[in-house]
Image (tube, rainbow, N blue to C red):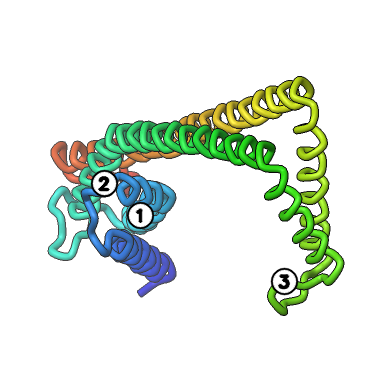
Amino acid sequence: MNNSGFTSLCLKLIGVVFILSSLLDYLTLAIPLNWQSSQWQISLVTSIVDRGVVPLVGIAFILVGYWIDSLNAPISGKLSRFDLRVPTYVLATILGLVFLLMVPLHLNNLNQAKVDALAQINQGAGEGANQIQAFLSQIDQLSQNPERLNQQIQQLNQVVESGEVQGRNLNPQQIEQLRQQRSQLEQLRDLSKNPTEYKNRIDELTKQLQTQLIDRRKQAETQAKTQALKQSLRVGLSSLMLAIVYSAVGWIGFRMIMIGGTVKMSQPKAPKS
């Protein structure tokens, strides 16, 4: 075996290893199967598309190996028994179809995931509004019960001075949080003595909390939509380009076989003696 033949054989073997390892990788990515989950489908399609170039590299190695063979000896129109070109073209055609079908599948799953994320955001916003209402109701009850309010302030004073709760020492950050809570309760106690100022303060606090809730909701919605758009563009376009390349390789390869196998290299005529 000459150098070109050895190089051709190595390229074919490397190509086969690339293709088989990538197919095995695709198989392991799909296990365990969970077709009912759109998130599982999104993860699977993204992983397959990210690794979509690996089989293409293997196909390129195999075809380059046969091209090197064609440079050294004319290749007849008939394919040899162990010719890898036909299964390579079949695989390229199948992969082209698979990557093409992945485009609408992935876009549909991303749209469903975006709808689910927006629904969760709306649900979280509703729960946040209920929490705000419960918090305001608790403040209102405390303001109407000065004795209970004073008791909580005294309890916080004892905890802050002792630096421990139920025998457990508090760190400086926890103590600072308790001091802030005590300060808020003291302000509430002072405000409860002035109904007008108290009402204005509660209205201001309500507006502030609602504004923060709306801002967080808008930010979460924008992030969900942006993430879905980025995924659809990256994975969708990559899958479409892979589908075009694989389909072109398969179609051109089968066309060459139909018109006579491979392109024959023209041989120079021997000079006449």
Residue 237: assigned label: none
Drawn side of residue 223 relative to residue 65, left or right: right
Of the numbered discs 3 and 1, the one sitting upstream in the chain is: 1
Residue 95: assigned label: 2
Identified at 34% across, 53% down, the residue is 59
Which of discs 2 and 3 lies nearer the camera? The answer is 3
Q: Gap between marks 2 and 3, in whole Å? A: 64 Å
Element at label 3:
strand
Q: Label 2 crowding class (10 Å Cα cut-off): few <14, some 14-19, many 20+?
A: many
Q: Gap between marks 3 and 1, in whole Å? A: 63 Å
Q: Is residue 156 visible?
A: yes
Task: Give the answer, above or below, for where 242 lies relative to 76.
Answer: above
Where is mark 1, residue-wise?
55
Find residue 53 and report its horizontal and vertical position in percent.
41, 50
Quadrant in the rendering for residue 64:
bottom left
Of the numbered discs 1 and 2, the one sitting upstream in the chain is: 1
Which residue is most to the right? 161
Q: Amino acid at mark 1?
A: Pro
Q: Is residue 56 visible?
A: no
Task: Give the answer, above or below, for where 154 lies relative to 135.
Answer: below
Q: Amino acid at mark 3?
A: Val
From the viewer's side, name the closer residue of 73 and 133. 133
Find residue 192 and report its horizontal and vertical position in percent.
75, 33
Element at label 1:
helix
Verify CB contact (< 8 Å) between mark 3 and mark 1. no
Where is mark 3, residue-wise?
165
